[in-house]
Amino acid sequence: MPGIGPKSASRLTYFLWRGDGQQPRDLAQALVELKEHTRLCEVCFNITEESPCPVCREPTRSTGLICVVEEPLDVLAIERTREFKGRYHVLHGALSPVEGVGPEDLKVRELIARVKAEPVKEVILATNVSLEARPRPCTSKSRSRLWG
Protein backbone atom coordinates (compact mmCIF):
# COMPACT_ATOMS: atom_id res chain seq x y z
CA MET A 1 0.00 0.00 0.00
CA PRO A 2 1.32 3.46 -0.82
CA GLY A 3 2.58 5.32 2.23
CA ILE A 4 2.96 2.20 4.36
CA GLY A 5 6.55 1.05 4.57
CA PRO A 6 7.83 -2.29 5.83
CA LYS A 7 8.05 -1.09 9.44
CA SER A 8 4.47 0.23 9.53
CA ALA A 9 3.20 -2.88 7.76
CA SER A 10 4.88 -5.04 10.39
CA ARG A 11 3.33 -3.01 13.21
CA LEU A 12 -0.14 -3.22 11.66
CA THR A 13 0.22 -6.96 11.11
CA TYR A 14 1.33 -7.54 14.69
CA PHE A 15 -1.48 -5.32 16.03
CA LEU A 16 -4.10 -7.29 14.10
CA TRP A 17 -2.52 -10.63 14.96
CA ARG A 18 -2.39 -10.08 18.72
CA GLY A 19 -5.86 -8.52 18.98
CA ASP A 20 -9.10 -10.42 19.16
CA GLY A 21 -10.24 -12.33 16.09
CA GLN A 22 -13.00 -9.83 15.35
CA GLN A 23 -10.71 -6.88 14.46
CA PRO A 24 -9.34 -8.39 11.23
CA ARG A 25 -12.87 -9.42 10.20
CA ASP A 26 -14.19 -5.91 10.88
CA LEU A 27 -11.34 -4.38 8.89
CA ALA A 28 -11.94 -6.76 5.98
CA GLN A 29 -15.68 -5.99 6.01
CA ALA A 30 -15.00 -2.24 6.12
CA LEU A 31 -12.72 -2.55 3.09
CA VAL A 32 -15.34 -4.54 1.17
CA GLU A 33 -18.01 -1.93 2.00
CA LEU A 34 -15.66 0.88 1.00
CA LYS A 35 -15.18 -0.68 -2.42
CA GLU A 36 -18.88 -1.49 -2.87
CA HIS A 37 -20.31 1.86 -1.73
CA THR A 38 -17.95 4.37 -3.31
CA ARG A 39 -17.63 5.52 -6.90
CA LEU A 40 -16.33 8.44 -8.90
CA CYS A 41 -18.44 11.57 -9.14
CA GLU A 42 -19.84 11.86 -12.67
CA VAL A 43 -18.94 15.56 -12.74
CA CYS A 44 -15.57 16.06 -11.00
CA PHE A 45 -14.31 12.46 -10.63
CA ASN A 46 -13.73 12.76 -6.90
CA ILE A 47 -14.45 9.69 -4.78
CA THR A 48 -17.97 9.76 -3.39
CA GLU A 49 -20.85 7.66 -2.12
CA GLU A 50 -23.38 9.62 -4.19
CA SER A 51 -23.00 11.08 -7.66
CA PRO A 52 -22.85 13.98 -8.10
CA CYS A 53 -20.73 14.42 -5.00
CA PRO A 54 -21.60 16.88 -2.20
CA VAL A 55 -19.24 19.56 -3.61
CA CYS A 56 -20.78 19.38 -7.09
CA ARG A 57 -24.31 19.46 -5.61
CA GLU A 58 -23.59 22.48 -3.38
CA PRO A 59 -25.53 25.40 -4.94
CA THR A 60 -23.41 28.09 -3.28
CA ARG A 61 -20.23 26.93 -5.04
CA SER A 62 -19.08 28.85 -8.10
CA THR A 63 -19.65 26.86 -11.29
CA GLY A 64 -17.36 29.24 -13.16
CA LEU A 65 -14.27 28.28 -11.15
CA ILE A 66 -12.66 24.84 -11.45
CA CYS A 67 -9.63 23.73 -9.47
CA VAL A 68 -7.79 20.88 -11.22
CA VAL A 69 -6.00 18.49 -8.88
CA GLU A 70 -4.12 15.23 -9.35
CA GLU A 71 -5.71 13.07 -6.66
CA PRO A 72 -8.79 12.98 -4.38
CA LEU A 73 -6.55 13.65 -1.36
CA ASP A 74 -5.69 17.02 -2.92
CA VAL A 75 -9.38 17.97 -2.73
CA LEU A 76 -9.40 17.14 0.99
CA ALA A 77 -6.31 19.29 1.58
CA ILE A 78 -7.83 22.30 -0.18
CA GLU A 79 -11.21 21.81 1.50
CA ARG A 80 -9.53 21.89 4.92
CA THR A 81 -8.60 25.52 4.27
CA ARG A 82 -12.30 26.43 3.89
CA GLU A 83 -11.25 29.17 1.46
CA PHE A 84 -11.94 27.74 -2.01
CA LYS A 85 -15.56 28.25 -3.11
CA GLY A 86 -15.40 26.77 -6.59
CA ARG A 87 -15.58 23.21 -7.86
CA TYR A 88 -12.96 20.59 -8.56
CA HIS A 89 -11.78 18.28 -11.31
CA VAL A 90 -9.68 15.27 -10.26
CA LEU A 91 -7.27 13.96 -12.91
CA HIS A 92 -6.41 10.71 -11.06
CA GLY A 93 -2.71 10.98 -11.68
CA ALA A 94 -0.01 13.18 -13.15
CA LEU A 95 1.55 13.45 -16.56
CA SER A 96 4.66 11.31 -16.63
CA PRO A 97 6.17 10.75 -20.05
CA VAL A 98 8.96 8.71 -18.45
CA GLU A 99 6.37 6.26 -17.07
CA GLY A 100 4.24 6.46 -20.22
CA VAL A 101 1.41 8.44 -18.60
CA GLY A 102 -0.03 10.95 -21.05
CA PRO A 103 -3.18 13.12 -21.12
CA GLU A 104 -5.20 10.22 -22.53
CA ASP A 105 -4.47 8.22 -19.34
CA LEU A 106 -5.92 10.91 -17.08
CA LYS A 107 -9.29 12.66 -16.88
CA VAL A 108 -8.08 15.43 -19.24
CA ARG A 109 -10.57 14.71 -22.02
CA GLU A 110 -13.38 14.94 -19.45
CA LEU A 111 -12.01 18.27 -18.20
CA ILE A 112 -11.98 19.67 -21.72
CA ALA A 113 -15.57 18.51 -22.30
CA ARG A 114 -16.61 20.05 -19.01
CA VAL A 115 -14.99 23.41 -19.79
CA LYS A 116 -16.76 23.43 -23.16
CA ALA A 117 -20.17 22.50 -21.65
CA GLU A 118 -20.23 24.62 -18.47
CA PRO A 119 -19.94 28.40 -18.02
CA VAL A 120 -16.35 28.16 -16.79
CA LYS A 121 -14.52 31.47 -16.38
CA GLU A 122 -11.36 30.27 -14.68
CA VAL A 123 -9.42 27.01 -14.35
CA ILE A 124 -6.85 26.76 -11.57
CA LEU A 125 -4.14 24.14 -12.04
CA ALA A 126 -3.32 22.96 -8.51
CA THR A 127 -1.05 20.13 -9.57
CA ASN A 128 2.42 19.25 -8.36
CA VAL A 129 5.34 20.72 -10.23
CA SER A 130 7.85 18.30 -11.69
CA LEU A 131 10.41 18.63 -14.44
CA GLU A 132 8.98 15.80 -16.50
CA ALA A 133 5.36 17.01 -16.23
CA ARG A 134 6.03 20.69 -16.87
CA PRO A 135 3.97 22.17 -19.67
CA ARG A 136 5.48 21.57 -23.10
CA PRO A 137 4.41 22.73 -26.51
CA CYS A 138 1.94 20.28 -28.00
CA THR A 139 2.31 18.95 -31.50
CA SER A 140 -0.67 19.60 -33.72
CA LYS A 141 -1.34 15.84 -33.74
CA SER A 142 -1.52 15.56 -29.92
CA ARG A 143 -3.52 18.80 -29.70
CA SER A 144 -6.11 17.53 -32.15
CA ARG A 145 -6.44 14.24 -30.24
CA LEU A 146 -7.25 16.12 -27.04
CA TRP A 147 -9.44 18.94 -28.32
CA GLY A 148 -11.32 16.83 -30.85
Image (cartoon, helix red, strand yellow):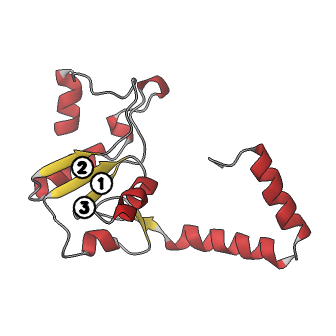
Q: Which numbered circle lies on residue 137?
A: none
Q: Nearer the viewer, residue 4 or 94?
A: 4
Tell me the crowding category of disc 2: few under 14, some 14 to 19, or many 20 or more residues within 10 angstroms, Cα based. many
Whichever of callouts 2 and 1 sits on the residue coming sooner in the sequence is 1
**Residue type for callout 3:** Arg
Q: Amino acid at mark 1?
A: His
- Give amino acid for label 2: Leu
Circles 1 and 3, Cβ within 8 Å, touching? The answer is yes
Which numbered dot is residue 87?
3
Q: Which residue position holds label 1? A: 89
**Residue 15's quadrant in the figure?**
bottom right
Q: Position of residue 54 (x, y in %)?
A: 33, 74
Q: Which residue is mark 2?
A: 111
43, 77: nearer the viewer: 77
* In the rendered image, the vertical position of residue 143 relative to residue 79, given as above or below: above
Q: Answer above or below: position of 142 versus 84.
A: above
